[in-house]
Amino acid sequence: EMLLHQSGLLVEYGWVVAVAIQLVMASALVLVLSSSARWFCPGLGAIYRRMVRSRVLQTLSLLLQVGKPVPESLAVLSGMPMGAMALRMLHRARTRIEQGEPFGDSLFRVGLLPASMLPLVRTAERAGNLPWALGEMADALYDRTMRNLQRVVQVVFPFVVILFGVVVGFIVVAMFLPLIKLITELSG
């Protein structure tokens, strides 16, 4: 009977559920279509930023290994499908480098290099092994991101299973309760 009462509330306030579902779907659509929204989204943004940074550093590493100068490498990167936010950052970094700012500082200032990796880039520039260092940093960023993502999935997965169990249980009880009530009324 309590479930019937709760289902009555669900029917009465169904519009709230419908609006909430539409808001979630609209938010998901915005995140899929807008790289800026993904970049600044709480939680998801940190993962996305690390993935973009990893891809940028890995590609820069490869381009520098084949002998392309840094501004030209950044120009090549700007032609790749990376999302509008990353492309703006690459353009700003290229402009800063062409104005004489050091490579690591320009990537850090535009947001393409984490602060923890700035000393490594400076040292690699002085040592002359920048392509190798960028590749190693890209791999480290990617590995850290995958480990963090795996941890999040391991924490969230049980809650999703429980949520689906509750929804299925509610539907099953909602379907069989009226049948049981009908059978008891007909037999009595």
Image (spheres, rainbow, N blue to C red):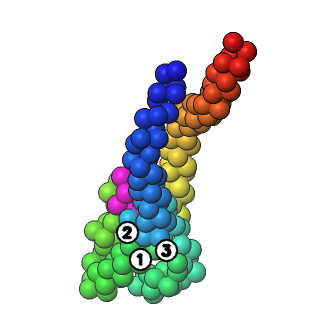
Q: Which residue is mark 2?
A: 36
Residue 166 in the image: x percent, y percent? 57, 30
Q: Kindly report which numbered mark, 3 or 2, lies closer to the viewer in this rendering.
A: 2
Q: In terms of image quadrants, where is residue 45?
A: bottom left
Residue 162 in view: no
Q: Name the secondary structure under disc 1.
A: helix
- Looking at the image, can residue 5 be seen? yes
Q: Which residue is mark 3?
A: 82
Residue 174 lies, with reference to residue 113, above or below; the image says: above
User: Is the residue under label 1 in contact with that under label 2 (CB below 8 Å)?
Assistant: yes
64 on left or right of 93: right
Between 183 and 123, which is closer to the camera in this rendering? Answer: 183
Residue found at x 41% / y 49%: 15
The residue drawn where x is 28% and y is 68% is: 109
Q: Which of pointers 3 and 2 lies earlier in the amino acid sequence?
A: 2
> Seen in the image, is 65 located left or right of residue 6?
right
Whether pointer 1 and pointer 3 mark residues with C-beta atoms closer than 8 Å, the reply is no
- The magenta segment is 38-43
Check disc 1 and report the residue beneath it. 84
Q: Is residue 111 above or below residue 24?
A: below
